[in-house]
């Protein structure tokens, strides 16, 4: 029982500290978490996996299937 109280207090303090960080944030905005909006990923031409999958499927759809010829 005592351990449970300690864990709850630690988690509560962590949540309070996170809330304080959010409230005191100067610009009141957060970076986008989408991978395609990351400048480093853009420089390496990396997109999100869903977009890359869609692009590769389109490219394969437009290829000529030589096995059927």
Image (cartoon, rainbow, N blue to C red):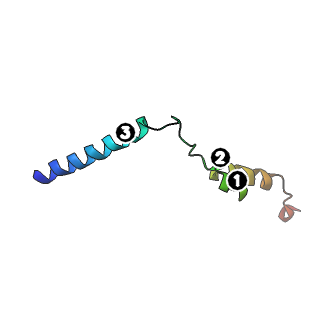
What residue sits 74% from the left and 55% below the top? 56
**At numbered mark 3, what does the secondary structure look like: helix, strand or loop?**
helix
The answer to which of 30 and 20 lies nearer the viewer is 20
Question: Which numbered disc flags the more N-terminal residue, 2 or 3?
Answer: 3
**At numbered mark 2, what does the secondary structure look like: helix, strand or loop?**
helix
Per the image, the residue denoted by label 2 is 37
Q: Are marks 3 and 1 in contact (CB under 8 Å)?
A: no
Q: Are marks 2 and 3 in contact (CB under 8 Å)?
A: no
From this view, report whether residue 45 is shown above or below residue 11: below
Q: Furthest residue to the bottom?
A: 67
- Which mark, by number, is residue 20? 3
Q: CA distance from mark 2 to mark 1?
A: 7 Å
What residue sits 42% from the left and 37% below the top? 24
What residue sits 56% from the left and 43% below the top? 31
Q: CA distance from mark 3 to mark 1?
A: 33 Å
Q: Furthest residue to the right?
A: 69
Label 2 vs label 3, nearer the camera:
3
Q: CA distance from mark 2 to mark 3?
A: 27 Å
Residue 44 x, y percent position in the rendering: 71, 59
**At numbered mark 1, what does the secondary structure look like: helix, strand or loop?**
helix
* Side of 11 where 49 appears, left or right: right
Q: Quadrant of residue 46?
A: bottom right
* Side of 29 where 41 appears, left or right: right
Question: Which numbered disc flags the more N-terminal residue, 2 or 1?
Answer: 2
Q: Are marks 2 and 1 in contact (CB under 8 Å)?
A: yes
Residue 69 x, y percent position in the rendering: 89, 62
Mark 3 crowdedness (10 Å alpha carbons): few <14, some 14-19, many ≥20: few
Residue 18 x, y percent position in the rendering: 37, 43
Q: Quadrant of residue 41?
A: bottom right
- Which mark, by number, is residue 42? 1
Q: Furthest residue to the left?
A: 1
Mark 2 crowdedness (10 Å alpha carbons): few <14, some 14-19, many ≥20: some
């Amino acid at each position: 029982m005592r351990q449970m109280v300690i864990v709850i207090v630690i988690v509560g303090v962590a949540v309070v500290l996170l809330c304080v960080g959010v409230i005191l944030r100067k610009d009141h905005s957060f970076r986008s978490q989408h991978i395609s909006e990351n400048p480093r990923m853009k420089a390496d031409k990396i997109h999100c996996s869903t977009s890359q999958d869609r692009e590769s499927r389109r490219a394969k759809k437009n290829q000529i299937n030589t096995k059927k010829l």
